[in-house]
Amino acid sequence: MKSLLILQQGDKYTSSITISMIIPRFFFLFFVLNIPFMSSSQSTIVTKPHLIILTTGGTIASVNGQPMIDGPALVQAVPDIAEHATITVETFSKIGSSQMTPAHWLRLAQRINQLLQENPNLSGVVITHGTDTMEETAYFLNLSIRSKKPIVLVGSMRSANEISADGPANLLNAVRVAVDENSIGKGVLVVLNEEISAAREVWKTHNRRVETFQSAAGFLGVVDPDQIRYYREPTHPHTHQVTFDVDSISTLPQVEMVMDFTGFDPDILTYFAERDLDGLVIGSFAGGRISGGMLEGMKRAAAKGIPLVIASQVPEGRIIGYPSYPFPVVFAPDLSPKKARILLLLALMKTQDMAELQSFFERY
Ligand code: ASP
């Protein structure tokens, strides 16, 4: 029988626990029976790389719509992980990722930075996460974790009870990526469907299919049965190369996002202009172009001094040659509006100067 060392922080396991005590019956399908837990007081010779798996919820942690399962049960479902790493697992949250907020991002980044600092021998961190907002959490962490060590987000498109559930294989692959030395220094990675994507580039593109995560520039690499194979490097600064320090703050600047559409009603932006916002991202048409209604609405928001950033709703290609507007505006040349929002809220911790904000969007 394979063994898997699981030390759950905050909990003490003093004896072996049978899986049937802690997991739904459906999940039995994936299990090797009775994998032992060990308490943190027991000693062990660690010969494999040490990883921490933080579980946050999402489809990868759900069975047939039932409440999200705990981190240890999720990891136990994939006994092959023990061949690659010694695992510490921590249940961070049990939510669908549509319920993630910037407050969760902040707490998650702070926890990961703390774990990396407290465990100098740690090889990396894997975060299980719903796919709906995985690209946002990934990009936030990409700009706020100060380490070269692999930080890998993983989820699944099918829950554990479905035929061809992809969660167990994705989790195993995420662990393999996290312990691979070629993953060091590549920033935050997203692993699904045997593909490795860069946090800055990845988009969820399909409501249902397992190949949902795509990047216009292609995958960084793939998870083959015999090896992790990288084909390129991320090209923008990330993790250890950036200076956004989120560890000493308790809240992030408040930045909202509004998408343009035909016949946009400027009063929508009046609502935002009257709130005490720190910044606002406008999801424009291609090339940074906006409707007449949006132009009028943005004037109102600009008059209130709210920093405005335009990012294109169109998934591919940059905004080339910024259109001029009768008020100051920053352009996100090739970030999605959601990711432009993340960069804006971090950049606003450093400056409100529009030219300086523009330089952040050129570099990151
Ligand atoms: N509802 C899920 C979520 O938490 C979808 C998924 O995980 O794939 O994002």
Image (cartoon, grey):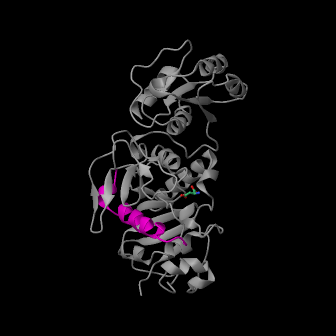
Quadrant location of residue 44? Answer: bottom left
Name the residue: 50% across, 33% down: 313
Q: Is residue 239 left or right of residue 62?
A: left
x and y, in percent, of residue 314 in the image: 46, 34
x and y, in percent, of residue 56 in the image: 57, 60
Residue 53 visible? The answer is: yes
x and y, in percent, of residue 122 in the image: 42, 63
- Is 120 magenta? The answer is no
- Is 162 magenta? The answer is yes
Quarter of the image where the C terminus is located: top left
**Overall secondary structure of the magenta section:** helix
Q: Is residue 265 above or below residue 190?
A: above
Name the residue: 45% across, 30% down: 361
Residue extending furthest front? 262
Name the residue: 30% across, 46% down: 233
Q: Nearer the viewer, residue 357 or 61?
A: 61
Give the magenta-colored segment's residue range.
Answer: 161-185
Q: Is residue 105 above or below residue 17?
A: above
Residue 122 visible? The answer is: no
Quarter of the image where the N terminus is located: bottom left
Image-quarter location of ligand 1: bottom right
Name the residue: 67% across, 19% down: 304
